[in-house]
Image (cartoon, grey):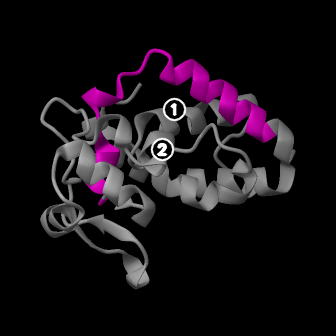
């Protein structure tokens, strides 16, 4: 598997190929079968992968905190809702919800764990979404994900082999 520090460089080298593979999948993959392939590879590769050694997702994105989680998160950290918002958050894109003020995410700790523990938002828990349904309809987003997550990159590479895809 590619080292997290090298993923951006390696993904850039394969940018055209990955875009062509995405187009290939859109025209040739069966939606249900592709979901099964993604889920199988996700399970297989994440079984032995320690995300805390990478955390590119936390380093390269601002954290997105749903409004309904704020009170629970504040309580977990032992502060008020107002303090939680003031210390950590700003309004999200288009004024919807909240996101952390900084990149890397304000909740990323030095050991790679999340300051929010089990209160971590679902969108963080599910990243890189490779085991979620309807992958065929989110392949464009996957092209961004493979520039950040070594496991998502590897899933894409293995799918190319499974489909017999060669750079054209």
Residue 29 is left or right of residue 89, and the answer is right
Mark 2 lies on a secondary structure that is loop
Residue 67 image-quadrant placement: bottom left
Q: Which residues are magenta?
A: 34-62
Q: Residue at x 35, y 29 (%)?
A: 51
Residue 146 is left or right of residue 28, and the answer is left
Q: Is residue 2 magenta?
A: no
Mark 1 / mark 2, whichever is N-terminal = 2
Quadrant where the N terminus sits is: top left
Q: Residue at x 21, y 48 (%)?
A: 107
Residue on which the image places disc 1? 154
Mark 1 lies on a secondary structure that is helix
Residue 10 image-quadrant placement: top left
Residue on which the image places disc 2? 127
Q: Which mark's residue is nearer the viewer, 1 or 2? A: 2
Is residue 146 visible in this depiction of the protein?
Answer: no
Real-space Cα distance between discs 1 and 2? 15 Å
Magenta stretch: dominant SS? helix
The numbered dot on residue 40 is: none
Q: Is residue 52 magenta?
A: yes
Q: Residue at x 78, y 56 (%)?
A: 26
* Front-most of residues 149 and 165: 149
Q: Please state the horizontal and vertical placement of residue 166, each as a whole percent of the image.
A: 68, 40
Q: Please state the horizontal and vertical placement of residue 134, each as a whole percent of the image.
A: 74, 51
Q: Is the residue 15 above or below the residue 50 in the image?
A: below
Q: Residue at x 76, y 32 (%)?
A: 36
* Front-most of residues 116 and 151: 116
């Amino acid at each position: 598997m590619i080292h997290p520090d090298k993923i951006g460089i390696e993904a850039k080298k394969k940018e055209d190929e990955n875009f062509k593979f995405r187009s290939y999948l859109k025209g040739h993959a069966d939606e249900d079968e592709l979901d099964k392939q993604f889920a199988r590879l996700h399970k297989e590769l994440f079984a032995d992968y320690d995300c805390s050694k990478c955390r590119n997702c936390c380093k390269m994105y601002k954290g997105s905190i749903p409004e309904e989680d704020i009170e629970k998160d504040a309580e977990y950290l032992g502060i008020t809702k107002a303090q939680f918002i003031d210390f950590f958050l700003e309004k999200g894109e288009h004024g919807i919800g909240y996101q952390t003020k900084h990149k890397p995410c304000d909740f990323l700790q030095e050991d790679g764990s999340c300051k929010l523990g089990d209160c971590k938002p679902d969108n963080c828990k599910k990243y890189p979404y490779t085991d979620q349904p309807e992958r065929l309809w989110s392949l464009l987003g996957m092209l961004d994900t493979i520039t950040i997550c070594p496991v998502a990159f590897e899933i894409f590479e293995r799918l190319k082999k499974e489909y017999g895809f060669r750079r054209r």
